Amino acid sequence: MSKNIAFLDLSAQQARLGEGLRQRLDAVFHHCRFVMGPEVTELEGALARYSGARHAVAVSSGTDALLAVLMAEGIGPGMAVFLPSFTYTATAEVVLLLGAQPVFVDCDEETFQMSLLSLKERFHDVQRAGQYQPQAIIGVDLFGQPAPWDALNQFAQQHGLTLIADCAQSFGASYHGRKLGREALATTLSFFPSKPLGCYGDGGAILTDDDERAALYRSLRSHGEGVQRYDVQRIGLNARLDTLQAAILLAKMEVFDRELARRADIAHIYDEGLPKGVIAPRRVAESDSAWAIYCVTLPSKKVRDSAQDFLKEHGVPTAVYYPKPLHQQPAYAKHHDGAALPISEKLGEKVLALPIHPDLSDEQLNYVITTLKEWATHTL
């Protein structure tokens, strides 16, 4: 039985979607509008309705979503953009691609989300140095849990900063009883296959309530064109979502809420069943996670590696998100001012992600927990 456990089981999901998925794909092959076909517009409407946002603009990836939003805000040389160091590289690389300066911020040890205390310290660091103009904050909903959006919005407003929500991992999550999508000027989504709502390739979207910015995002995703094709108004991107991916996402949205509920059930069972010494992720107040990743914390790297090795030997796949924070990565170290970010540096040595996906059976889930308890009995 243990050999059948998958960290992410897209094959099982595809089989479960069955005829509905095939009908969606067949429709695209019938009309042959593979770029910006009607399914893209349909998907944008579905995303907007689900999130409550006024506009949804489908793009080719979560990275391109971030890039387009920063371009629309005029982010560039001489500007500082604050973002967490304990996250995926895409959040920072788009800042450097535009010539701006990423300013890495530490995170909360229990929720993994951006630390407001560290944000305040890093903001004052930039002010004192005087080299860059503070311009924007990119908050990240790491692992599917909402960031502290109330506090981030308040800080951004106090200091005249643009707040952008990187919700690549959290589409479907709720904050104060409302689906995420309106917590910032713009919200970016990723539909990478491993995400709670993922396609079978790359995909992304931008959510916003701002009419003018929505029009600008639509232009930027299509080479900066205006209303008419070949009417190039600005320098843009080739960032359109292909129609096949939109069709796949529409099929998946039919079962999305049920899949989210299953993820939440699995997270709760993990919470209740973890052995002592294996720390469950703490919930962010007034929020419901999308549970893209269920990440536990262990006492040290040695203990974490021991748990991972034991689980692997017994047929349980795991992953480490993320082994090293961005400010310590070779590509970013030269752009970091040397400020200590102790929690981000420590977490990379202690975190371990357990399997969580809607097709994980109760039997498989119990096996993961039982195996982890067996390891803990001999180690902790």
Image (tube, rainbow, N blue to C red):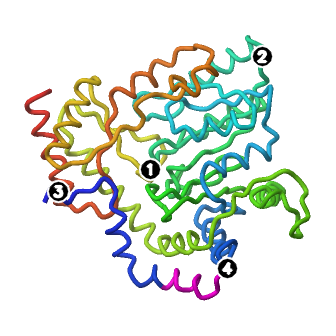
Image marks 1 and 2: residues in contact by CB distance under 8 Å: no
Residue lying at the far top of the rendered structure? 128
Name which of mark 1 and mark 2 comes first in the sequence.
2
Q: Looking at the picture, how far across and down is residue 358, in whole percent?
A: 34, 62
Residue at horizontal 18 percent and vertical 32 percent from the top: 276
Q: Horizontally, is 293 left or right of 249 in the view?
A: left
Q: Looking at the picture, how far across and down is residue 309, in whole percent?
A: 20, 36
Image marks 1 and 3: residues in contact by CB distance under 8 Å: no
Q: Nearer the viewer, residue 265 or 126?
A: 126
Q: Nearer the viewer, mark 2 or mark 3?
A: 3
Q: Secondary structure at mark 4?
A: loop
Q: Nearer the viewer, residue 57 or 193?
A: 193
Q: Residues within 10 Å of mark 1 (few under 14, many from 20)?
A: many
Give the magenta range: 23-32
Image marks 4 and 2: residues in contact by CB distance under 8 Å: no
Q: Which residue is mark 1?
A: 289
Q: Is residue 27 magenta?
A: yes
Q: Which residue is mark 2?
A: 131
Name which of mark 4 and mark 2 comes first in the sequence.
4
Q: Residues within 10 Å of mark 2 (few under 14, many from 20)?
A: few
Name which of mark 4 and mark 1 comes first in the sequence.
4
What amino acid does circle 4 point to? Arg
Q: Which residue is mark 3?
A: 3
Spatial CA span between label 4 and label 1: 36 Å
